[in-house]
Amino acid sequence: MKYYEINETQARQAKGMWSFSDYIDGSETSAYQKRVDEAYALCEETPEDRKEKALYYADMYAKKLAENINKGFRIELMCPSVMISGAGNFPVRKKEKQNAARNKNISEYHHIQGYLSKIKKLSNASTAIKSGDENALEMLQEKINTLETLQSEMKAENAYYRKHKTMKGYNGISDERAMEIDNDIHKDYWGVPHPSFQLTNNNAKIKSAKARLANLSRAKAKDTIETENEYFKVIENTEIMRLQLIFDGKPNAEIRTILKSNGFKWAPSQEAWQRQLTPNARRSAEYVANEIAKMEANHEQN
């Protein structure tokens, strides 16, 4: 684990540009290190074959986050708050430049959060819900329930903050954590614990999961379908959501190449060449049959 330096001197000076309260020495460094700790904690949940890449993303996150935080201090030093300087002869143009710099820095901060998303993807790759999983429908419903609960919690926290202008006193949040949230809200200029993009992104996940659940439910409700052509049997196996091609014996090297190039893999447990059951898979099965026909026609001509 590696931390990068947070400029505590500028942090203290920046606090003085918008607040009458005293700066707590080391508070910005402590808050930064907690965020970095969370990134590295995600790495610990990552499978060994992907951990090195996850650690790389964690280090990039730690480095870029420190740069972003320090840049934020420099931006705050550009112009004081009107409550500090007073309204008389207030440097409006300088404040406009400061706000533009703030917006750019916030945009960079959102980009930096992408490193956390990359680590989470590496961590969750092995636990992704697959259509062929035995309990895929139940797992998807559980995912939807979790996302909907999160959406409700984020809305409730935002409503509480709008009313009280602090997270202190909110059920389930300690005073220490509430102070951290309040500080983050002010520093990031979101105005609430959960900015609109978080709610929008989570809502999109809910809609996506519900659509997938509906489609998968319809697919699994259908019976397994078997058809056959002169080269292989085609099974639409709705139980495991796989399109399977069954040959009489082992196909030759040329046919195996055609199968592999069209996304079909040999599954010993099923004794079939298969891929996920989708409309594209059906088209690929037809294409494989046509390619085999062309191959055999060429062999006959030669």
Image: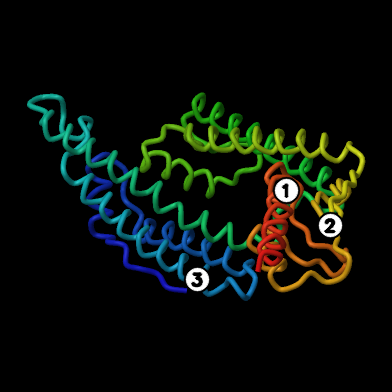
For label 3, count other residues whose C-alpha is less than 10 Å away and answer few (under 14), some (14-19) or many (20+). some
Task: Please name whichever residue, 212 or 146, is drawn nearer the observer in this view of the structure.
Answer: 212
- Across and down, in percent, residue 281 comes to 71, 48
**Residue sitting farthest toward the right:** 223
Q: Residue 24's image quarter?
A: bottom left
Q: Along the horizontal axis of the image, is 31 left or right of 200? A: left
Looking at the picture, does residue 41 appear above or below residue 183?
below
- Looking at the image, what colour scheme do you see? rainbow
User: In this view, which residue lies farthest toward the left?
Assistant: 89
Q: Which mark is residue 204?
A: none
Residue at 24% across / 59% down in the picture?
9
Comparing 213 with 199, the one in front is: 213
Identify the residue position indicated by label 3 in the image: 55
Horizontal and vertical percent position of residue 40: 53, 67
Residues tagged 1 and 3 counted as in contact (Cβ below 8 A): no
Which residue is pictured at 61% across the width and 43% down the height? 173
Of badges 1 and 3, the one in the foreground is 1
Residue 236 image position (x, y, % from top left): 84, 47
Q: Tell me which amino acid carries mark 2.
A: Phe
Q: Residues within 10 Å of mark 2 (few under 14, many from 20)?
A: some
Mark 1–mark 2 contact, CB under 8 Å? no
Which residue is rendered at x = 52% and y = 54% of the image?
A: 117
Q: Indicate the amino acid at tag 3.
A: Leu
Residue 267 screen position, x and y as percent? 81, 66
Compared to residue 125, the image places residue 193 above or below, namely above
2 vs 3, front mark: 2
- In the picture of the structure, the residue carrying the numbered disc 1 is 286
Give the quadrant of the C terminus: bottom right
